[in-house]
Amino acid sequence: MIEFLQVNFVPVLFAGLLCFLMLGFPVAFSLAATGLAFGLLGIEIGLFPEVLFQALPLRVIGIMSNETLLAIPFFTLMGIILERSRMAEELLETVAQVFGPVRGGLAVAVILVGALLAATTGVVAAAVISMGLISLPIMLRYGYNRTIATGTITASGTLAQALPPSLVLIVLADQLGRSVGDMYQGALLPGLMLVGLYILFIMVVAIVRPKWVPALPAEARIYVQPNGSSGHRSLLGLFVLCAVAGYFWSGVHESIMNPFLGRETPAPGDETFIMSTTVATFLALFLAILNRVFKLGLISRLTEQVTFVLIPPLILIFLVLGTIFLGIATPTEGGAMGAVGALIMSAFRGRLSFKVLSGALESTTQLSIFVLFILVGATVFSFTFNAADGHIWVEHLFKGLPGGQMGFLILVNILVFILGMFIDFFEIAFIVIPMLAPVAEKLGIDLIWFGIILAMNLQTSFLTPPFGFALFYLRSVAPRVDYDDVVTGKRIPAVTTSQIYSGSIAFIFLQVIMIAVIVMNPGLVSGNITKVKKLSEERVEELMNIPTSDYGADAWPGTDSTTPAEGATDPSDPVKW
């Protein structure tokens, strides 16, 4: 028996964890209990030294002092404050008025608002519940197909997992040992492409099945001009003007920002995009304020409403993502600024009360403790797992796979997709990713690219039955019984659970397509990450072989620090001068 355990310790370890989970114990405690129990068993059968667990307290203290994880409570607090300040309600109402007059416009509005909420809140529950309460009754009122309506809401709510400042990206960066800023930069373009794919799907539905996604009737459009016009021409004119201003800034960005930042390298594309958008945003805000103060009539009611509703979240996005991409702030500092910005925004709207603040702080504390306990449990489990050379066992498990990198990526994505049907993304990130990361690195896979692929895959876990959390969130706010609509007076049938589940299927396929696109095109991720110049191997070897007398204090006679080392002829050489 002892010999069997010594040979098969890692598989038995996993079987023990599965038993704890099947008994219904919380994941955090199951991980810790499995790690400790099998650690003691390993000591008893002579697999580990007795002093093994002396290093465990240092691991736990290391988790407590990890500054990267501070971003989680900051972004969570920001999201909850914004959700309770009713920003989502105003955004949905306004954007729906912009796109409502065309078929599928309401669904497009939900997707765009979902993307904006994702870039400001980073919390799936807040986005899905807000849009379920606000947009679902409107979609049902005007005859939207049930599966399209529910699928659009749940899928757009999960964009908070793929778009920065996603909590998933923070956790994955920590587990993969990579920079959160690099993860954010790498995720930006794939996340925006996924938003575009959702919108393209709605456009196809509007063409193929126009009755499924009807336009808003004339009586539902509330920002009409006194002469009866919709105000869309004015909005288009302002958009073109801002786009021109943003394009002009992109042309002069480097000449202005490089001296300001003390940089000689070309500006990254994401930085230029963020700053161009910021310039365009402030131009729109300036014109809207000018129009309102002096009653100039330059822009329509719709244009003015769109400007004043969109500007606050866009400013918040710049505070968070803009400062991170510009290199002014770390992700943790960006999260802190975002939380402060959300508090200020809520206060200006008159919606920041003691009750709201205390409730937001309580929810933030609960989520942060939840994450921390899982991380501590996962650390105890991985401690025993690594002590038993589990990473080598996993490596041998994947070694025989055909296809090299591609075969590994396909199998890992299938594994994560299936696990996402049953367990939470935090649990997958803390249990599975530490085992897969060393194998991926040995296969030569860029871990940022690997992390973005997994983040996109983990996003599907919110939509896949039977335990898709976004489906549960929408079920909690969707009407369970037939009701009379307050506007039209019509009898609206209840939304069934099967309609919510079936609505997610098409969007799961879209996400799988996006995962495949990222796997086949690594440049979508790596092309957006700021490259840091590194010394060549030859230069490193040259520096390693330089005698110590050629640099440092010993190389300078006396105390004159301006005297070059013996034999130095080039003042630009930092090693000898």
Image: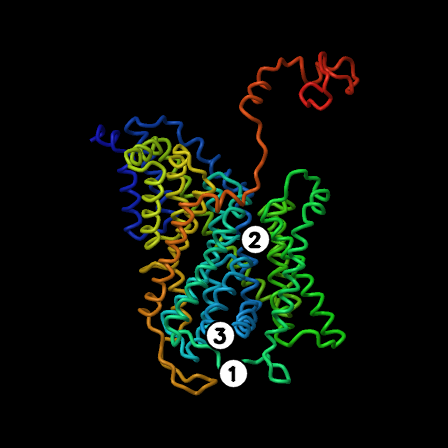
On screen, residue 110 versus residue 325, left or right, reads left
**Residue 284, how many percent across, how many down?**
67, 65
Q: In the rendered structure, which disc, 3 or 2, sits on the residue that comes first in sequence?
A: 2
Disc with the residue nearer the chain's start (3 vs 1):
3
Would you name the residue on which mark 1 appears? 218
- Residue at the location (43% across, 80% down)? 141
- Residue tagged 3: 102
The answer to whether residue 405 is above or below residue 416 is: above
Position of residue 328 measured from the top left corner of the image (x, y, whole percent): 65, 46
Q: Of 255 and 565, which appears nearest the observer? A: 255
Say few, some or many: other residues with alpha carbon within 10 Å of mark 2 (under 14 / 14 to 19 / 20 or more).
many
Mark 2: amino acid: Phe
At 33% from the left and 33% from the top, the residue drawn is 395
| Residue 306 found in image quarter | bottom right
For the residues labelled 3 and 1, say whether their Cβ atoms are less than 8 Å apart.
Answer: no
Of labels 3 and 2, the one closer to you: 3
User: Mark 3: which secondary structure?
Assistant: loop
